[in-house]
Image (spheres, rainbow, N blue to C red):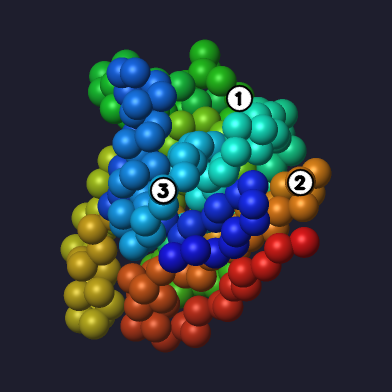
Amino acid sequence: MILFETPEVLALDKPPGVSMATSGRADRSAREAVARLLAACGEKREEELWLVHRLDLGTSGVVLLAKTAEAHRKLSRAFQSGGVQKTYRALVWGHPRPAAGSIDVPVGRDSRDGRKMRVRADGKRAATGYETLARLTGIADLRLTPETGRTHQIRVHLSSRGHPIVGDDFYGGASRWHGVRITAHRRVLASIAHPLLHSERIRIPDVKIDVAAPLPHDYRKVLSVLSLRPLATETRSL
C-alpha cells in the first residue's frame, strides 16, 4: 500500500515476510529487493527506484524509496547523520519495569550464530527508548524510538531485558505462548509466525517527510483478542 508519494519519494507499507536483504552485486541486489517490495505491495513501476533503508524480514511498516538519484543521496545522508526520527511498535512478553526508559547497551555479532546479534561489551553503541502504551495479560504494547540503527537492535535489546517480541523465533519470543492459560489468548498468540514489530512512523524534518503506517492485521488481532482496542495511527506529510 502506498502511504505517501512526491516526485522524489515513495513511501510504502511493507507487509511482514518480505525480504529486503541485499548481497553480492549491490546495485542488482538492491533492485531485486525493491522489486520484491513493490510486488508485495501490489505496485507496478516502470521508473527506477532506489532503496534507502531496510526492515527485517518479519517487520512491517513504513519503507521509503527514492525516485531520483538526488533524493537517494539526500535521504541516505539523513539516515547516516541521525536526522531521521523513527518510531516502532512492538508486542512483547512480560511488562517492562520501569514502564518507560532507555536501553543503552552495545550490540555485536553473535560469534556462535552469525545470523544473530547479541549484547556484547565490544559491540557498537546501541540505544533504544521505549514506553509502555498498555499492559495486557502477560504482554505489553510498546512504542519504541531507536536512537541508533544497529542490525536487529530493537529485538536484541528487548530480549536482553527478558521481554522478547511476540513471534520472534530468533530471540526467544516464538514459543512462550505454551505457558498462556486462557485458550483464546493462547490460540491467537500461537498463530503468530513473525515478530510483531512494526515501523510505525518516520519523520525527516529537513526534507519535510512525516509518514505513518497503520498497525497490521495480526497485530490488531492480538490486541483485539486480548481485549484492548488498538490505537489509531495517521498517514501524513508536512
Which residue is disc 3 drawn over? 46
Q: Is residue 138 visible?
A: yes
Q: Quadrant of the N terminus?
A: bottom left
Amino acid under disc 2: Val
68 or 73, which is in the foreground? 68
Which residue is disc 1 drawn over? 125
CA separation, marks 2 and 1?
27 Å
Q: Is residue 95 visible?
A: no
**Mark 2 and mark 1 residues within 8 Å of each other at the beta carbon:** no
Q: In the rendered view, does 6 fall on the left or right side of 41?
A: right
Q: Is residue 207 above or below residue 131?
A: above
Closer to viewer: mark 3 or mark 1? 3
Q: In the rendered view, does 225 fall on the left or right side of 61?
A: left
Closer to viewer: mark 3 or mark 2? 3
Picture coordinates of residue 92, whole percent (x, y): 43, 58
Amino acid under disc 1: Arg
CA separation, marks 3 and 2?
25 Å
Label placed on residue 207:
2
Secondary structure of the residue carrying tag 3 is loop
CA separation, marks 3 and 1?
40 Å
